Amino acid sequence: MQLLDGKLAAQAIKEDLKKKTSALQEQGKRSPHLAAILVGTDGASETYVASKVKTCAEIGFESTLKRFPSTISEEELLREIEELNNNADVDGILVQLPVPKHISDDKVINAIDPSKDVDGFHPVSVGNMVSGTPTFIPATPYGILLLLEHFKVETKGKHAVVIGRSHIVGTPMSILLSRKAYPGNCTVTICHSATTNLKEICLQGDIIVAALGQAEFLTADMVKEGAVIVDVGITRVADASKKSGFALKGDVKFDEVAPKSSAITPVPGGVGPMTIAGLLMNTYNAYMKKQ
């Protein structure tokens, strides 16, 4: 069984980006610049954004973090996004979701200039992805592709089962794994809450991507011998034995599924670090398109 270590793969990508950024600076050019907007004080969002800003500093990227109270109006937030759209020195823009309920996620996503949409959520980016046109891929699916590529996981001709149909992971993952490319060339089945024979479908999967957000949902009896398992989920589960009072669990029951798999991602330390790697790659690509 091979552990698909996201920290290891992400580090390789960061080192490569650091070299490329250093080369740009030696040529007298500015560094790629990522701007992030954080609304409110959600703990998980704070952690994610802090990690992104820290990683930018590690590899030599410029980063701007704009913080706003949860009381900011939708109109004000859209104005802030427009300012970043018009800033020629900003290559990538991300608004950490979710935003407060009085602000429309869709309006926020649609307000971002598609040429700076490094989260890959804008309808233009999604349309390009579906049509196979070069574009920004949502960071988590992009990170998964980079992970499979780093560990040279064979995907051609495989049956990939994707559990979950969110626009952030499940749906784009199903499209990307079916495309004529590597990683890709899979026959893909996408499953969700209305799938009636989920276990039977999973047992056919050479590759299973679990992205439904339900702790330890995928068990050993749902997985065939030698399958490749990509666990996208991360859920806090109460655990009195931990100092924090909780443990982080993926969508896969790791201890019983891992012995049956040929390769598997851990949680934490699997897909998580690769999501940031995907975001940074998108930012670098946005910068290079301008050049």
Image (spheres, grey):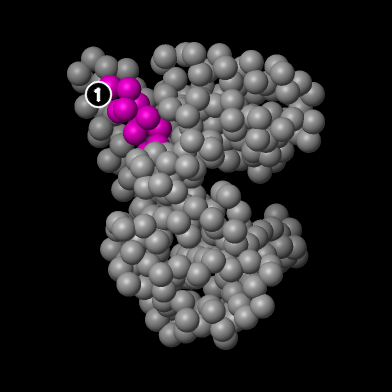
Q: Residue furthest front?
A: 131
Residue drawn at (75%, 63%) of the image: 238
Q: Residue 66 location in percent, x, y? A: 60, 22
Residue drawn at (64%, 15%) of the image: 79
Q: Judge the density around disc 1: few (<14), some (14-19), many (≥20) Cα neighbours within 10 Å.
A: some
Q: Quadrant of the N terminus?
A: bottom left
Residue drawn at (60%, 54%) of the image: 166
Q: Height in image: 119 above or below 268?
A: above
Choose between 126 and 282: the one closer to the eye.
Answer: 126
Choose between 233 and 43: the one closer to the eye.
Answer: 233
Q: Quadrant of residue 195?
A: bottom right
Residue 233 visible in the picture: no
Magenta-colored segment: predominant secondary structure:
helix
Kindly identify the amino acid type of the residue bearing the numbered disc 1: Leu
Q: Quadrant of the C terminus?
A: top left
Is residue 211 rendered to the left or right of residue 9? right
Residue 108 visible in the picture: yes
Q: Which residues are magenta?
A: 281-291
Q: Height in image: 281 above or below 89?
A: below
Whether residue 283 is in magenta: the answer is yes
- Circle 1 residue: 24
Q: Residue 276 location in percent, x, y? A: 47, 43
Q: Quadrant of residue 201?
A: bottom right
- SS at badge 1: helix
Q: Residue 91 location in percent, x, y? A: 42, 24
Residue drawn at (31%, 27%) of the image: 289
Is residue 187 rendered to the left or right of residue 290? right
Q: Height in image: 266 above or below 89?
A: below
Whether residue 112 is in magenta: the answer is no
Is residue 157 rendered to the left or right of residue 266? left
